[in-house]
Image: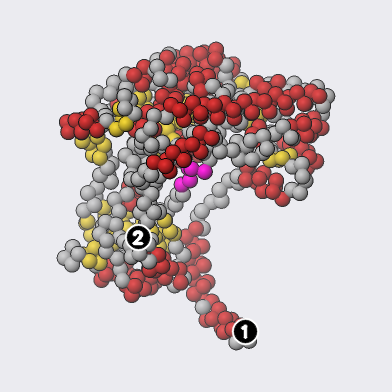
């Protein structure tokens, strides 16, 4: 120990200049990154965790809890999980549009089994990554192809993600009146007045049920009048339905607005999520990195180019594969990276080499192991040299590591490049996938392409699901595929076998959730889920009733009828920021400053305490 200290200090002194250089370079890469807005819910949760009051309550989290305040996994979900495991299904890739069986049942749940849109094939249903993913795909599609004004009208207030999702695709975000803070209810007259002034042909966002964050929904007759006005204004309704069945306990009642608009002749967009009504909160994670430009190896994985181009990055390439030797073009790669010969990329990835200097601090993509599509990897000593040159050029390495352990059978060996670059002092980005090395192909759904006939894109289908057998219609699929027209839609050469003659103005549906790949008729599981979701809804409704009753017992003279008039997981209490602060400081009841509470955080054991606290904070 007596020797280790001075030696360590000496090393630090010797490397001080390089450390400062690396830190300076890293700082320049990220100096333009703006701090994201603070997460109000996360702040509430962190403050709740620090509180030592045994009576503390967290009413900020938007996830269901049982009457003991514990996370709840639906029995129907447990059954489905056990069934999937028992069937020993493979993990092959799903079609790009998702599971046909899942899509069929999802759209039937939304529109009803007797819907003409289903019977007559007037819908296109595809699967995505939860509600946010569906909204993101829908907004991107509408931004590019919607012929009306490039704006969207949202209710005020609306779910926090709606605004950034639409702004991210460069749509102009506007609002119409919805919530009335004076009554803690729906501002029907204000909404109708504003909607009647929206420019014709615009896009309007509607919460199908259990409006988030207010819990305030229009009544059936108000939906009828809104449908009439929206149709007169020739607006395109985009429904966000994240709480079907969870709002009232009745899936048909919660879908009233969607089905009414279709019955009235509207063409609609619909985003569905099953996170809330199936308790599947942890099944929708995705990470995103953005940078201005990127240099890719030639060739590279087919999805790299469209992924980076989709976020408006300038895509270039450096030499990698040598077709003469069927091996790694080491000298070409080093020359391109150091001397900076860059290539422009055509749609077919043909290379047109032109001299251009790689700007210092640029992003370079590297395959960590098992290069796709060539299978050609640099040797360890070649990685060492590449690390040296890339560091000299002050480039930011972005490793794509999809085959760790699957390449050589040795996870450490396959991670050599990543670990070597870190040891050499690089700051890196790393994308990992476990599809290949764990054989999990099916649970990795990516983007999908929602298509409208009326924007001049031919949408076709082939037979897949046979309702008579509740299985795969093999003969029908083979027959359709053999005569279908194959259309190459995307730059990554994904092929879509698509149906004949979809009527103009067809309906596009965007859905999200974990798919049911069992191929088993889900009627039994469906009936159990209906019971599960009604049980959750009934508990929420019961807590609303008990809260209102206990406020009256406390002697509150305020009108708390909005607590039971509102619906779903959230309640806008009408409390002011000062009252919220008092509630938190004096009673350890945590909620957001706008007075919104998650009713799921209330239990039979604490509802009286909450009523007492709310009364004293508001009297």
The majority secondary structure of the magenta stretch comes to: loop
Q: Disc 2 marks which residue?
A: 406
Mark 2 falls on what kind of element?
loop
Is 56 situated left or right of 79 in this image?
right
The answer to whether residue 150 shows anywhere in this view is: no
Seen at 59% across and 84% down, the residue is 4
Q: Position of residue 547 (x, y in %)?
A: 73, 27
Specify the segment rendered in magenta. 282-286
Q: Of 60 and 250, which appears nearest the observer?
A: 250
User: Which scheme is used to colour this image of the protein?
Assistant: secondary structure
The answer to whether residue 278 shows anywhere in this view is: yes
Q: Is residue 602 magenta?
A: no
Q: Position of residue 396 (x, y in %)?
A: 42, 62
Q: Position of residue 56 (x, y in %)?
A: 74, 42
Work out which quarter of the rendered image holds the N terminus and state it.
bottom right
Q: Is residue 283 magenta?
A: yes
Mark 2 residue crowding within 10 angstroms, few (<14) / some (14–19) / many (20+): some
Seen from this angle, which residue lies furthest front? 86
| Residue 508 image-quadrant placement | top left
Mark 1 falls on what kind of element?
loop
Q: Position of residue 239 (x, y in %)?
A: 47, 26
Q: Earlier in the sequence, mark 1 or mark 2?
A: 1
Please determine whether, in this image, residue 149 is positioned above or below residue 491.
above
| Residue 593 image-quadrant placement | top right
Seen at 82% across and 29% down, the residue is 619
Disc 1 from disc 2: Cα separation: 41 Å
Q: Disc 1 marks which residue?
A: 1
Q: Of 49 and 384, which appears nearest the observer?
A: 49
């Amino acid at each position: 120990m007596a020797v280790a200290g001075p030696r360590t200090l000496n090393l630090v002194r010797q490397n001080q200049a390089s450390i400062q250089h690396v830190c300076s370079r890293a700082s320049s890469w990220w100096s333009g990154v703006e701090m994201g807005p603070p997460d109000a819910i996360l702040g509430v949760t962190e403050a709740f965790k620090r509180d030592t009051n045994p009576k503390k309550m967290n009413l900020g989290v938007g996830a269901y809890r049982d009457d003991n305040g514990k996370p709840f996994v639906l029995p129907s979900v447990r059954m489905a999980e056990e069934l999937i495991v028992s069937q020993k299904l493979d993990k092959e890739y799903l079609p790009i549009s998702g599971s046909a069986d899942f899509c069929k049942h999802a759209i039937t749940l939304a529109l009803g089994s007797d819907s003409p849109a289903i019977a007559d094939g007037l819908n296109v249903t595809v699967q995505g990554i939860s509600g946010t993913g569906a909204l993101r795909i829908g907004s991107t599609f509408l931004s590019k192809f919607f012929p009306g004004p490039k704006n969207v009208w949202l209710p005020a207030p609306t779910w926090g993600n709606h605004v950034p999702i639409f702004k991210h695709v460069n749509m102009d975000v506007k609002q119409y009146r919805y919530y009335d803070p004076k009554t803690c209810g729906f501002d029907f007259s204000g909404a109708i007045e504003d909607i009647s002034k929206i420019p014709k042909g615009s896009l309007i966002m509607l919460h199908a049920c259990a409006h988030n964050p207010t819990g305030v929904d229009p009544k059936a007759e108000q939906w009828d009048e809104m449908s009439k006005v929206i149709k007169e204004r020739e607006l395109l309704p985009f429904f966000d339905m994240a709480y079907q069945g969870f709002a009232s306990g009745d899936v048909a009642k919660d879908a009233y607005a969607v089905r009414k608009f279709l019955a009235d002749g509207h063409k609609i967009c619909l985003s569905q999520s099953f996170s809330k009504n199936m308790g599947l909160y942890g099944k929708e994670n995705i990470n995103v990195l953005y940078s201005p430009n990127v240099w890719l190896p030639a060739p590279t994985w087919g999805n790299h180019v469209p992924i980076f181009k989709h976020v408006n990055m300038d895509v270039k390439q450096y030499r990698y594969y040598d077709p003469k030797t069927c091996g790694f073009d080491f000298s070409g790669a080093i020359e391109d990276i150091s001397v900076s010969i860059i290539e422009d990329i055509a749609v077919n990835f043909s290379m047109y080499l032109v001299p251009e200097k790689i700007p210092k601090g640029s992003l370079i993509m590297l395959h960590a192991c098992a290069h796709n599509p060539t299978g050609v990897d640099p040797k360890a000593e070649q990685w060492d040299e590449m690390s040296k040159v890339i560091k000299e050029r002050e480039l930011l390495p972005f490793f794509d590591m999809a085959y760790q352990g699957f390449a050589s059978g040795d996870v450490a060996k396959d991670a050599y490049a990543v670990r070597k670059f870190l040891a050499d002092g690089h700051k890196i980005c790393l994308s990992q996938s476990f599809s290949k090395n764990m054989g999990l192909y099916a649970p990795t759904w990516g983007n999908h392409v929602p298509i409208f006939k009326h924007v001049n894109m031919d949408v076709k289908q082939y037979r897949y699901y046979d309702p008579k057998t509740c299985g795969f219609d093999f003969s029908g699929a083979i027959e359709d595929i053999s005569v279908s027209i194959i259309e190459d839609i995307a730059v990554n050469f994904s092929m879509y076998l698509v149906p004949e003659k979809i009527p103009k103005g067809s309906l596009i549906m965007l859905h999200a959730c974990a798919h049911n790949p069992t191929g088993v008729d889900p009627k039994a599981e469906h009936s159990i889920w209906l019971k599960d979701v009604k049980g959750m809804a009934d508990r929420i409704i019961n807590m609303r009733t008990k809260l209102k009753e206990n406020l009256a017992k406390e002697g509150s003279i305020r009108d708390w009828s909005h607590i039971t008039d509102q619906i779903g997981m959230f309640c806008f209490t009408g409390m002011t920021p000062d009252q919220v602060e008092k509630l938190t400081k004096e009673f350890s009841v945590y909620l957001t400053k706008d007075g919104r509470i998650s009713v799921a955080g209330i239990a039979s054991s604490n509802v009286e305490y909450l009523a007492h606290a709310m009364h004293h904070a508001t009297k």
